[in-house]
Image (tube, grey):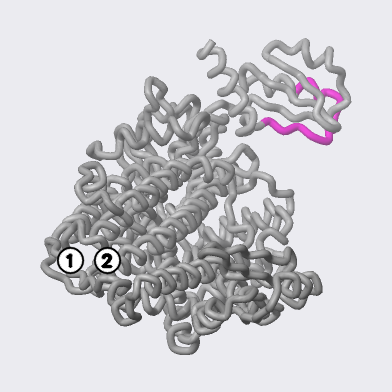
Amino acid sequence: MIEITELTKQFGTKTAVNHLNMTIKPGEVMGLIGQNGAGKTTTFRMILDFIEATSGTVTWDGAKIDDVKRQKLGFLPEERGLYQKASIENQILYFAELHGMKKADAKIALRDWMKRLNVVGKPEDKVQSLSKGNAQKIQLIATVIFEPEFLILDEPFSGLDPVNTELMMQEILNLKAQGAMIIFSSHDMAGVEKLSDKLTMLRHGNVVLQGEPNALREQFGRTEIYLEAPISDTELLQIPGIAQLEHAGNGRKLHLSDPAVGKDVFNLVTQTGYIPVFAQEPPTLDTIFRREVAAGEQNHA
Amino acid sequence: MRKKQLFTVIKQTFKTRIKTVGYWMLVLTPILLLGAMGGIGWLVQATQSQAQPEIGIVQNQTLSQHLKGDQALDAIIKDYPTDQAAKKDLSAEKLDAVLVEKDQKFTLTKRADGQNIDDNSLTASLTQFNTAQRAQQLQVDSKTLDQLLAPPKIDTHVQSQKGVNANGDNVNGANYGVTIVLGILIFTFLSSYVGMIAQEIANEKSSRIMEILLAATSPGVQFFGKIGGIGLLALLHGALYLLCGLVGAIWLPKIPQVKTVLDTLQGVDWTFAGITVAIVLVSILLYMVLTAIVAAMVNDLSQVQQAVAPVTYLSIIGYALTFLVNGQSHNMFLNIMSYVPFFSQTLMPARLGLQYATMGDAWIALGLELVALVLLGTFGLNVYKQNVLTYREGNITKSAILSLKNLFKRH
């Protein structure tokens, strides 16, 4: 288990990460969200010992991450990097060997991974000849080929098209199923919600939200209604407690100041009988994220 | 496990670089240049139309006999009864020059497009002729004249701190000559491999590959792995030149240039050669470590040249000072500098070659280099670790100074 306790990093007078606490158990995925500069990458760099923490600890099964543990750790950096002039095989085997994998095993595994991720190209091809999407897949293979027990993924979906994003999500879920501990950062809230068992939201280095995605959403109450019904905006806005109304696709989204108002809305829109859609849900992670960002900016001002 | 990872990094660095055209260009260019120079020399010699010059002597049998008997003068001597007859043949291009003697003064008339006459040999021969003529006038016999003109025989013994050394000038000359050639080689090696190691590190840092590598290994493994890999390439480079030298010595000993080198090397003292090689090898490592530290400060490949320039300047200083050593046995500045790591690799062998320093001095210089290597390796690793994943904006020289300030701080 990975345990992060009171982890703090200060750069001069600026606090990049402030008293961060979290645990990641085997087979668990932790999503780390926050705006640019919230402290996500700094957290990863402290876990990886790239930078020294001002205070706090990071342990793996109760001990510091040493060279032995490091070999079972996979890291996908935000800014991808591969040897452009080297062949796919040459560099993947090098990375695998550094992680203690036998060359012969890595050779077989590489072919298997390239097939699974639909990489267009041969192991002998040079990386510079690959498309951006294929290069990203090779980068993921370099990170996971040795079957890491702990995986750090910094913005794994950035720059990927929807098909490849889905493919990568599936592989992350496969690694999770194999018992890997995974922490990743992303701006794609739908992806975070789909993958994460737990998530941590950072704002200016401070934890503002932490827990299971559904529980976090529920704690804000069911204040969102998606509605498809033959009723005018004016009639709806006459109900007290509707904070905001916006058009979304074929229907409308209502933001309630109190979940109890949902009942009044339901009664009004079903007066004439059947309606195609009425869904009362807690706010999405995206909405919560935007609210927290806005709140943070207000406090900062 | 660190050992295994270190070996993997060394192997990868070595294997990647040895496959590049750049490395083989570096190794082969000097050999090809030497070959090309030798080939051109041979071609010029083989195709030259130079024949023996023909010199006409006017009405002077004695002079004509003397010049014909002089082996050093490479010319055909012809007798002419009159100046006019000789000049006529000169105009008709049957002669290359006409030599006339009057009261022991000589006039040489040459054809502008005639064969080249070796002026030095001709002057020496005519001086000899004049001396013989005067000796005859003074009734000095030829045996006495030979005794008078015989040069003094000097047997050189050099008394140095090393003891008395017979034929010392030859040994010193050979050692010093080897040092000068070595200086050029060291400078070429340093500037090439300093650039190579800097590019390796800067490439991995700027392309962010370093982050992936350091997630798997410690900075120490990367730092020493790169130095090891490039160091092996430098050793291979040296070994290939040694092999070429041996092949040249065995197969081509009759070529004049190869013979000259072999004759010089025969005068080299092998204890001198041993300690020199040791000092040079440690200095190459020392420069590589310094370069690795500096290269870690680079943000992208365009800054490599700027970053390694001070390291190259440092090697130039030692190289340039080597040329000042000869005749400066008591120069305090040069004596002190010959012990200082980063400069001693050329200065100490030069002083040792000229017997201005003893083997004891050389061992001290080697010891100081080793101490500097250990210190730089230990403290430099901390600076490397600090910089290799830090991307600073602005002037790289400022970053370098900032980092070097922290070099010997406790971490």
Q: Residue at x 57, y 49 (%)?
A: B207
Comparing B288 with B49, the one in front is B49
Instruction: Identify whether B48 is placed above or below B181.
Output: below
**Could one spot residue A225 in this view of the protein?**
yes
Q: Are marks 1 and 2 in contact (CB under 8 Å)?
A: yes
Q: Which residue is mark 2?
A: B172
Residue A173 position in % (x across, y down): 57, 56
Q: Earlier in the sequence, mark 1 or mark 2?
A: 1
Judge whether A147 appears above or below B48 on screen: above
Provide the chain ID for the residue under circle 2: B
The residue at the point 47 percent across, 73 percent down is B129
State which quadrant residue B390 falls in. top left
**Region rendered in magenta:** A267-280
The residue under label 1 is B158
In this view, the residue in front, A100 or B191, is B191
Report whether A170 appears left or right of A143.
Answer: right
